Amino acid sequence: MSLKRQSLRNLIAEVSPESVVALTTQGTPMLLKEITHQLAMREKPVILVGGFSKGHFSKNALQLATEIHRVDKRNLEAWTIVARALYEFERAIGIKPL
């Protein structure tokens, strides 16, 4: 594995996921548990999490998503969403906490 500079579009094309879910405050409300349960049944799922101090995903970035959801009424920090998504995905695929 190596690092390289590329666009989000090219990265997603390279990964070739079955689905791309963007998590944004402007998305359709859905529980993160439901999203990760659905993603656990898909081949190579991708979750996009915005880490913006202000603003939102660009239109070009949102066009790459197959689904766009909001997982909380509040504006949460990106690390909080990522941690919750990882935990819920682990639960969805059957990894149990110690």
Image (cartoon, rainbow, N blue to C red):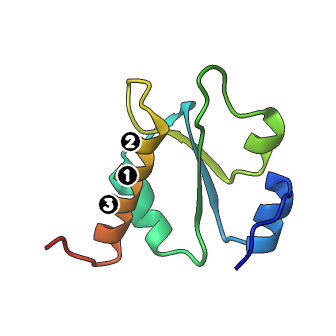
Which residue appears at 77% of the width and 33% of the height? 58
Q: Farthest residue in the front direction? A: 2
Q: Looking at the picture, does residue 3 appear above or below residue 48?
A: below
Which quadrant does the C terminus fall into? bottom left
In this rendering, the answer to whether 95 lies above or below 59 is below
Residue 93, position as x, y percentages in the image? 35, 76
Name the amino acid type tagged 1: Ala
Identified at 40% across, 54% down, the residue is 85
Question: In the rendered structure, which amino acid carries the disc numbered 3?
Answer: Tyr
Q: Earlier in the sequence, mark 3 or mark 2?
A: 2
Q: Secondary structure at mark 3?
A: helix
In the rendering, at what x and y percent does residue 28 appear? 52, 35
- Label 2 is placed on what type of residue? Thr
Identify the mark at residue 87; answer none if there is no mark.
3
In the displayed structure, does residue 38 sit left or right of residue 84?
right
> At x 70% / y 80%, what residue is drawn?
1
Secondary-structure class at tag 2: helix
Disc 1: which residue: 83
| Number of marks in the rendered image | 3
